[in-house]
Image: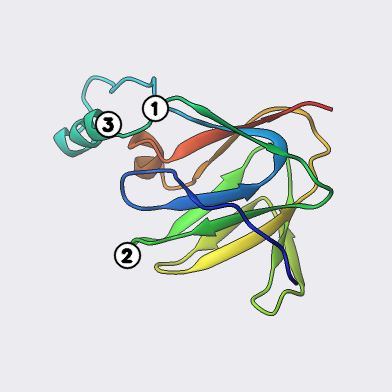
Amino acid sequence: MTQARPAAMPLTRRGFLVAAAVGGASLVGCSRSTTASGTTEAIAAAEAARPHTGKTVTARLSPGATLTFANQTAMWHPMHLHGHTFQVIKADGSPGPRKDTVIVTPMQTVSVRLVADNPGVWMLHCHNGYHMDAGMMTTLNYSN
């Protein structure tokens, strides 16, 4: 499979990147959340240090858009997209299973093919609760 991909966009300060070739869709950084009372000091510090700007990235949607998750950390990240399933693309470029969550292991890159057939605003996030609390989430927003 030969497909040009845009440069990856930082999703968190931990170096987790998501590159999206999802034109017509917007990936919006979740930068306006507040730290809940009782949150650990580490999460509060991480929340305060988040580099998110709240800017929207817009690209042109093509049939079978590809999202690429590149994990540059030592932690596992089960990445979950609400409202959709996607097809995992195997390392050799062939189609893999359909899922709504894909586990991205340390230092691994995983690409998935998304059919954008359910317009709206959908959360895309790491399914580790403490990673979400620290800001590892965004939204996928598109219309017909």
- For disc 1, the marked residue is 53
Indicate which disc, 3 or 1, sits on the residue closer to the N terminus: 3
Q: What residue sits 69% from the left and 34% below the top?
A: 25
**How was the colour assigned to the protein in this rendering?**
rainbow
Residue 74: mark in rendering: 2
Q: Quadrant of the C terminus?
A: top right
What is the three-letter code of the residue carrying label 3?
Answer: Glu
Q: Is residue 114 above or below residue 83?
A: below
Give whichever of 23, 93 is nearer the camera.
Answer: 23
- Kindly check if marks 2 and 1 are in contact, taking CB atoms under 8 A apart as contact: no
User: Local crowd at mark 3 within 10 Å, few (<14), some, or many (≥20)?
Assistant: many
Q: Is residue 94 above or below residue 46?
A: below
Mark 3 vs mark 1: in front: 1
Indicate which disc, 2 or 1, sits on the residue closer to the N terminus: 1
Q: CA distance from mark 3 to mark 1?
A: 13 Å
Q: What residue sits 79% from the left and 41% below the top?
A: 116
Residue 47: mark in rendering: 3
What is the three-letter code of the residue carrying label 2?
Answer: Ala
Residue 39 rendering spot, x and y as whole percentages: 23, 29
Locate residue 96: give its quadrant: bottom right
Q: CA distance from mark 2 to mark 1?
A: 25 Å
Q: CA distance from mark 3 to mark 2?
A: 20 Å
Locate residue 132: give its quadrant: top left
Residue 61 rendering spot, x and y as whole percentages: 77, 41
User: Local crowd at mark 1 within 10 Å, few (<14), some, or many (≥20)?
Assistant: few
Residue 33 rendering spot, x and y as whole percentages: 38, 21
Give whichever of 142, 8 is nearer the camera.
Answer: 8
Residue 86 rendering spot, x and y as whole percentages: 73, 53
